Amino acid sequence: MQSDPRLNGYLSRALSHELAAVQQYLMQATLAGLWGMTDMSTRLRTDVKEELVHAERLMARMLVLGIPSNATQLPPARTGRSVEEMLLIDRVLEIEAIRLYEEATNYCARIRDSETHALLTAILQDELGHLEELDRMLTEIHKGVEQ
């Protein structure tokens, strides 16, 4: 397949996003551990592992396409001052990922790159699941506040 600068850009942005998510979730997992919230820390460490898998899959695809792994400078990790704030920050991160992957999958469909489309679609589904889980956790927090 001939090099496509737009596709290269999507893959590089996706890799940067995944590595930023790793940094953010790891920072939050560490903070939750310091707060004595073992379950939350464990859940966030699971998210770190999932995001690392995404990054690895993206890197593998980039190598196949001859694209150098080019993650940009990562934004600062945002931790939050409470569990609710942490989840809201993570929700924004996941929504950004969903938008990126939706745009990228649409582009892959237009250029008929079925392999990259399949990869990005699978990651998109994972990100949608992450958003659903965050929304569930936020709903539980709000139910607890109302009682």
Image (cartoon, rainbow, N blue to C red):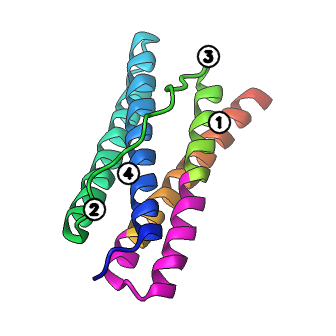
Mark whose residue sits in front, 3 or 4 = 4
N-terminal of the pair, mark 2 or mark 3, is: 2
Horizontal and vertical percent position of residue 123: 40, 63
Q: Nearer the viewer, mark 2 or mark 3?
A: 2
**Which quarter of the figure has residue 68?**
bottom left
Which of discs 4 and 1 lies nearer the camera? The answer is 4
| Of residues 125 and 20, the one drawn nearer to the viewer in this rendering | 20
Left or right relative to 145: residue 132 = left
State the residue at coordinates (75%, 27%): 145
In the rendered structure, which disc, 4 or 1, sits on the residue that comes first in sequence? 4
- Separation of marks 2 and 3 at Cα, in angstroms: 39 Å
Q: Nearer the viewer, residue 108 or 99?
A: 108
From the image, tell me which residue sits under label 2: 67
Residue numbers of the magenta segment: 97-119
Residues packed near mark 2 inside 10 Å, few (<14), some (14 to 19) or many (20 plus)? some
What amino acid is at disc 2? Ile
Q: Quadrant of the C terminus?
A: top right
Q: Considering only vertical position in the picture, is 76 above or below 126?
A: above
Label 2: element kind: loop
- What is the spatial separation of the Cα atoms under label 3 and label 1, in whole angstroms? 11 Å
Q: Which residue corresponds to mark 3?
A: 81
Q: Is residue 136 above or below residue 9?
A: above
Q: Earlier in the sequence, mark 4 or mark 2?
A: 4
Reading the image, the residue beneath label 4 is 15
Residue holding disc 1 = 88
Under tag 3, what secondary structure?
loop
Whole-Å distance between the Cαs marked 2 and 1?
A: 34 Å
- Is residue 130 visible in the rendered image? The answer is yes
Q: Quadrant of the N terminus?
A: bottom left
